[in-house]
Image (spheres, rainbow, N blue to C red):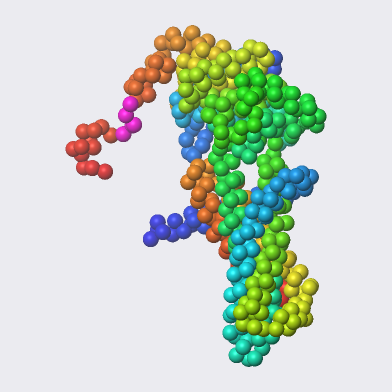
Amino acid sequence: MLDSIAGLGRFALRFVERLGRSQLFGLELLRALGAGLARPRLMVEQMYSIGVMSSLITVVAGLFVGMVLGLQGYYTLSDFGAEDSLGQLVALSLVRELGPVVTALLFAGRAGSALTAEIGLMKATEQLSALEMMAVDPLRRVLAPRLIAGFLSMPLLAALFSMTGVGGGYFVAVGLVGIDPGSFWSQMQSGVDFHDDILNGVLKSVVFGAVVTWISLFEGYDCIPTSEGVSRATTRTVVHSSLAVLGVDFVLTALMFGE
Amino acid sequence: MLPDRQISANVSADPRNTWVRIRGLSFDRGGYRIFDRIDIDIEYGRVTAVLGPSGSGKTTLLKLISGQLTPGAGCIEVGGRVVHDMSRSGLFALRRSMGMLFQSGALLSDLDVFENVAFPLREHTALPEALVRQLVLLRLESVGLRSARRLLPSELSGGMARRVALARALVLDPEMILFDEPFTGQDPISMGVLVKLIRSVNQALGITGVVVSHDVRETLSIADYVYVIGEGRVIGQGTPQEIEQSDSPWIRQFVQGHPDGPVPFHYPGPSIADDLFGDGG
């Protein structure tokens, strides 16, 4: 009994300590952002490996999610004779929620885990120590460009996801179930507001990008520098990032779309 | 806490003779005492070796000298300045005059050999590209890898990676290079190449060398002065000849590689009779 209480206490202490370390790491990283912005070439390289390399999985996932939305939406809307609103339903679902959230989950799995593994391996193979010994700050040279690339790439990927999702929905609506293309687009145009829907969706994806990249970089930087340590850190990145995205999404949705 | 650090900090250091002065250094990690009030002097322009078995804290000592770790007590001065009292920018300035050769080479895996060696120049200078190219090629020539400049670190053998790392450490003309286990896991030819390179770096360029290693023969062949550490203390010190002829049982066991002696073959614990015929446990 006492052992389990002590174990719980140790777990809580470790959790709080890690949380504190991650916050301090985040602050250090924010301080290093200026240096990251001053090296646009490094940032562009990272946008390629973080953003461009994640675009295929985003496009494929967006297409299927859009097609599923089209089908499910059609089955429900047709009960009420409102099939013409399918374009609006698909677009709103994508730009408000599914675009940012599903892209962030994919981003955590694809780019986040790769970032953690990369930084963790750099730590395990003493590359980060070597940078310190060459009087080069790894936060400025290695991590800051990745953070900036992460929160610039996320909204672009989310936009790509929503765009291909709308394409998938259009294919199902017009190609499979025979909805009039004119009403599909016009309902979408009239039902989606640029500020309330699209900009809020973009804001969500920027926040998700920052959260996922921050967690990924912290896990890599803080990992135990062994192969087992790196693999555990990679798993933690995916789990923590996914939970953080869903939790933050609830808060943002309540703030943005609440009365 | 006051005495150790302050008294030592007041010891006047002549940076031209003693480049690194360690006094009363103690360091604990994970509840274990790695160093217990050790004193070490590293002379300018000479190769000083620190020998000791695995786990005796040799790499930790290099990290303490370079300011990557902070001592629990005692004082470490490099070039007359106390390392652990420096700001981060002060430490970075110090490290520009100090190279470190890591055990694995620690080359940046996404850059090829040329770019790895050019990296410190690109980060710390604004030299024109033509000059960077010349400096890098000269450094690579001195380690025999000029023609390997377009290979990636993953395409290099362990010995080649260490030679590239040495070229990288040399490219900013440091005052001192710290060598972390430079011979571990090398075949005889690579070992010979590294011995020759470390010796020539010291003799031709006058760079102070600190070699931590447990490869006794190779290390004694290049060192001017040797410290043997173990159990958190300096067990012995002297020229390579003095170490080889030492009558300390501990040093004799270490230098000659005897399996049993002051460092026992058996991990400490109850006798085998207790374990076999006792109550168990």
**What is the count of numbered marks?**
0
> Residue A13, percent across and down?
53, 54
Q: Determine if residue B73 is in view.
A: no
Q: Is B278 rendered above or below residue A256?
A: above
Q: Decide whether residue B267 is among the magenta residues.
A: yes
Residue A177 seen: yes
Q: Nearer the viewer, residue A163 or A251?
A: A163
Residue drawn at x 52%, y 44% as measured from the top left: A224
Residue B239 among magenta residues: no
Q: Is A102 on the left-hand or right-hand side of B185?
A: right
In this rendering, position of residue A200 left or right of residue B66: right
For the magenta stretch, what is the residue range?
A: B265-269
Q: Residue A98 appears at what percent x and percent y?
A: 64, 70
User: Where is residue B265 drawn, in percent x and y?
Assistant: 33, 26
- Give the residue at the far left of this rendering: B277
Residue that appears at 45% across and 28% down: B54
As rendered, which of B196 and B239 lies closer to the eye? B196
Residue B134 placement: quadrant:
top right
B255 vs A71, left or right, is: left
Instruction: Give residue A212's quadrant in the image.
Output: bottom right
Q: Main secondary structure of the magenta part?
A: loop
Residue found 54% across the figure and 52% down from its top = A234
For the N terminus of chain B, the image quarter is: top right
